[in-house]
Amino acid sequence: MNNRFLTLCLFAAFLMICVHVRAQACSPSGTVKGIHPPDGECNRENDSVCCVAGKLYDKYTCSPPVTGQTGATLTLNSFQKGGDGGSPSECDGKFHSDSIPIVALSTGWYNGNSRCFHNITINGNGRSILAMVVDECDSSMGCDKEHDYQPPCRNNIVDGSRAVWEALGVAHENWGELSITWSDA
């Protein structure tokens, strides 16, 4: 009788763990089919990638859960007019100087403007910095004019200005992608 009870308890605990892990999962919500951008329409600044005709890119409406130290990938973005960020920021419809520490967050973390103008703490390269959220790194759409013919953002991106990279002390030749953690400040 005790073995049956123990087995039943272990099975119930296993099911609860599976449900919890499934609830935290962030799976693709579909794909976007790449198109060939018109000549000169995809800004390759900061090693930005342009969509490839016919390639399928995952899109997401979610991001991994935010914790005290959420794992992410820091990427480089220009928020200035004419920069690879493309359009003005989602938070205020304006362009911003790359000399201030600002970021765009993947769609799930951006959470429908709820983090606009809030600071986040970014930890990477042995340093920490506060940066303000001013934009969304769209994970749900891409490969069109509005998104500068770039693929959708991955669901774990903190897209930082040049000032963020400088404050983290990353050598310029290593700018591009960096494993970081972040949290709401």
Image (tube, grey):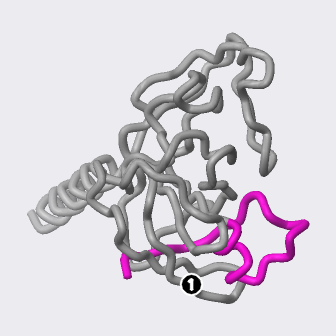
Residue receiving disc 1: 129
| Corner quadrant of residue 78 | bottom right
Q: Where is residue 127 in the image (x, y as percent from the top left)?
A: 65, 88
Q: Residue lying farthest right?
A: 173
Where residue 110 appears, as percent x and y from the top left, is: 37, 54
For image coordinates 38% across by 56% down, the residue present is 109
Tag 1: Cα neighbours inside 10 Å, few (<14), some, or many (≥20)? some
Q: In this view, does 114 lie to the left or right of 125?
A: left
Figure check: 119 above or below 145: below
Q: Is residue 111 left or right of residue 32?
A: left
Label 1 sits on a secondary structure element that is strand
Look at the picture and state if 42 lies above or below 84. above
* Left or right side of 166 for 157: left
Where in the figure is residue 146, as x and y percent of width and height?
52, 28
Q: Which of 182 and 4 is in front in this view?
A: 182
Give residue 116's position: percent from left, percent from top: 34, 62
Q: In this view, does 36 lie to the left or right of 66?
A: right
Pick the quarter of the image with the N terminus. bottom left
Magenta span: 162-185
- Residue at coordinates 53% horizontally, 68% vertically from top-left? 102
Report the front residue among 58 and 25.
Answer: 58
- The amino acid on which the numbered mark 1 sits, given as a three-letter code, is Ile
Indicate whether residue 170 is drawn in magenta.
yes
- Magenta run includes residue 5: no
Tell me where residue 84 sits by quadrant.
Answer: top right
- Locate the C terminus by quadrant: bottom left
Q: Residue at x 56, y 44 (%)?
A: 154
Looking at the image, how many numbered discs can be counted on the residues? Answer: 1
Q: Which residue is drawn at 37% across and 54% down?
A: 92
State whether residue 30 is above or below residue 137: above
